[in-house]
Image (cartoon, rainbow, N blue to C red):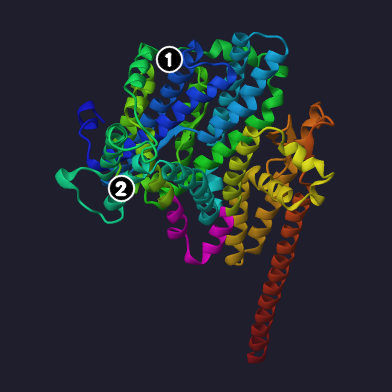
Amino acid sequence: MNAKSLFTIDRGDLDGFFGLLIDNLVQLLMIVSMCGLCGIGADSELLLDYILPGAALSILIGNLFYSWQASRLAKKESRTDVTALPYGINTPSLIIYIFFVMKPAYDAQLAAGADSENAAHFAWQLGLIACLGSGLIEFFGSLFAEFIRVKTPRAALLSTLAGIAIGFIAMTFALRMFTNPLVALVPLAFLLLSYFSKFKFPFGLPGGFLAVLVGTLIAWVCPMFLPESIVQHSMSVEAVKHSTAFLGVHLPKYAGDGLFELIATPTAWQGYLTVIIPMGLFNLLGSLQNIESAEAAGDKYHTGMSLAANGIGTITAALFGSCFPTTIYIGHPGWKELGAKSKYSALTGIVIATAAFTGCLTLISTIIPLDAGMAIILWIGLIITAQAFQTTPKSHAPAVAMGLFPAIAAWGFTVVHGAFIAAEGTSLQEMLSGAGAIYTAGVNDFLIHGLIVLERGYIFTCLLLAAIGAELIERRYFQAAFWSGLAALLTYLGLMHAYQIYYGNVVDFYFHWFEWFGGEKPGEDVLVFKATGLAASYALFGLVFFVIAWKQRVKEIQSGELESGSHDDLDHEGQ
């Protein structure tokens, strides 16, 4: 792809570009705001010279690769409708690494007497280790991921994405849009006209571009004529002027020295493996599901190559100062419906990198309200959800539906958890332990416990429940027994359902087997749920299905012997 062809962009790629650009800008601005919790301010060297440039470099590398990959596939298959895999900052990892790796490390350092600057530097180093760990898991996981994808029912892979799309994408952005309707909801009308009704706007303007343009104009113009009660979001010339203070050259800098310095001290980071290992596996599985989603939409990419590039992008991020993994984004079918092809991906990477390397990220956010692009993200969530039902066998719809619940519960717990963190005077730990035992707690306590249980490892739970359902619908009982046994194993290992709560509202995975390798047991002040009952239940699931499968196999063998015997008798009589 040469430079001239890159900037000859059609309306579909333009819509895709605006959507993916807004999505990545949201993540980068979240990094700016949330790093402040770890003592890394918006004007700090760590943020401006390492974290943001490192994140942008990984976004650039990944998007250029996936753009090239799409162009290559289009040429190979002589097609003009191939859509590149979307790529960007991994939102769950961003939130998890801030709240369960970097902030606890920062607070612990302050409590130990370190000053804020040194505490922030240590938190940053731990974030780099977490990011590197995620990248390594994804890279080496690419060696066997294709085998997993081929052996897993499509309903299982896509139902997980649909559950995430309903909660973390569609619902999250819908709630925000309905609280700021003029800026965020009115643009949705243009998007729905374009992609539901296939309405053609004057001059061939794409619906996504118009949506962002209309939202931006409303945010700037309407506050001049309408009261604040109607327009909740207004733009500020002063904010634009203030953002120019961040302008400057911020090229990526190698951060490997600080990373490997801390790696050499395992005692400083091995306790965070309960966060790093699950998140790395979740990222691997999520990317695998997105590749399956792309194939269901008509674009078949090489699984190993796609995942290896994903891992390389995240490893690059860690080596150049970013604590936050990048990943293949959920939503390929949505970008395809927009008409995006390969150029939208490359253009997004170039613009994001340029903005980060020149300090323009904040300036862009003060000119274009992010709410104006929410309609595009909502559209992506709708298409993903629809795809799970449209591209799987009709009979598998109940299995798809069953796989939605853990992801929806995970989104619900995210909301509840945020409320507990914001509230004063109560905590999850007090609520779930105050009644003496989880199983005798009140109704509200029981519901919260259930949300946590389903939230822990929900990507695995979604996949396994849907896989069991799909295999049972097809009466493949041995396969259903296998998936049930895998669910029992993952639950026993702590990758599903088990949890521990400490410091009131800190919810973490619980790996009891860490104690076998010298890890410390949770103290008496930690609330632990081991999920052994759930592991046993899954095992019994598998036993039931295995017995039925075995009896069915014996019956088939006996039936075959009888048929063979009757033929032998006839042959004997004939002789």
Q: As rendered, which of 134 and 183 lies closer to the eye?
A: 183
Q: Residue 43: horizontal and vertical position, in percent? A: 46, 13
Q: As rendered, which of 524 and 481 lies closer to the eye?
A: 524
Q: Residue 76: horizontal and vertical position, in percent? A: 30, 43
Q: Is residue 51 above or below residue 281?
A: above
What's the amino acid at mark 1?
Pro
> Crowdedness of circle 1 by 10 Å Cα count: few (<14), some, many (20+)?
many
Q: In the image, 40: left or right of 181?
A: right
Disc 2 and disc 1: Cα gap in Å? 36 Å
Asked whether the viewer can see residue 541, the reply is: yes
How many badges with numbers are in the image? Answer: 2
Q: Residue 419: horizontal and vertical position, in percent? A: 62, 38
Quadrant of the rendered image containing residue 355 = top left
Q: As rendered, which of 493 and 149 lies closer to the eye?
A: 493
Asked whether the viewer can see residue 300, the reply is: no
Q: In the image, 17: left or right of 284?
A: left
| Magenta residue span | 384-404
Looking at marks 2 and 1 on the same chain, the residue that comes earlier in the sequence is marked by 2
What's the amino acid at mark 2?
Leu
Q: Is residue 359 above or below residue 416?
A: above
Q: Tell me which residue sits at (69%, 80%) in the image.
A: 562
Q: Which residue position holds label 1?
A: 252
Q: Which residue position holds label 2?
A: 191
